Amino acid sequence: MTRLGRITRADDFVSLRKRGRRQHGESLSFVFLHDEQEEVRLAFAFSRKSGIAVMRNLARRRVKEAFRSASIPPGMYLVLANRKLKDISFADIVADVTRLTSRY
């Protein structure tokens, strides 16, 4: 199981948004940037359009677990939710994460 870190510094967010590669999937979109650290670091940007707070938190936990179960390259990931994320099964989220991260 992969250990997941968090992106907390403002500099990391700025570099991720400016220099990151974008990938769009069915339920999620990513912004990925390879960095010198050898761990996967995540940040989430789920708008209120994704649902109420309970639904957004549930979606965040499901995406984190999908990242843990998938074999993904280290780097920084900004995860953006699609509106229909709450209607998609966990298996579809894992497949989306695997398919999108395999491009890196």
Image: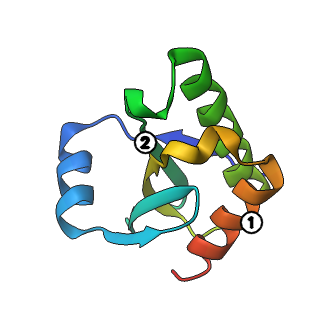
> CB of mark 2 within 8 Å of CB of mark 1?
no
Mark 1 secondary-structure assignment: helix
Colour setting: rainbow
Which residue in the structure is indicated by mark 1? 95
Which residue in the structure is indicated by mark 2? 43
Give me the residue at 69% from left, 42% from top.
87
Task: Please name the amino acid that badge 1 sits on.
Answer: Ala
Q: Where 103 falls versus 25 (above or below)? A: below
Q: Where 74 falls versus 46 (above or below)? A: below
Total label count? 2
> Which circle's residue, 2 or 1, is located before the other in the chain?
2
Residue toward you, 44 or 81: 81
For the residues labelled 2 and 1, the Cα–Cα distance comes to: 19 Å
The residue carrying pointer 2 sits among few (fewer than 14), some (14 to 19) or many (20 or more) residues within 10 Å by Cα, namely: some
Give the farthest residue toward the bottom.
Answer: 103
Q: Where 57 falls versus 66 (above or below)? A: above
Where residue 57 appears, as percent x and y from the top left, is 59, 24
Task: Please name the amino acid that badge 2 sits on.
Answer: Ala
Where residue 53 appears, as percent x and y from the top left, is 51, 17
Q: Is residue 9 left or right of residue 80?
A: left
Residue toward you, 27 or 73: 27
Q: Where 42 falls versus 40 (above or below)? A: above
Instruction: Give the numbered dot on residue 72.
Output: none
Residue 102's image quarter?
Answer: bottom right
Where residue 101 appears, as percent x and y from the top left, is 58, 72
Give me the residue at 54% from left, 83% from top.
103
Query: Is residue 67 shown to the viewer in this render?
Result: yes
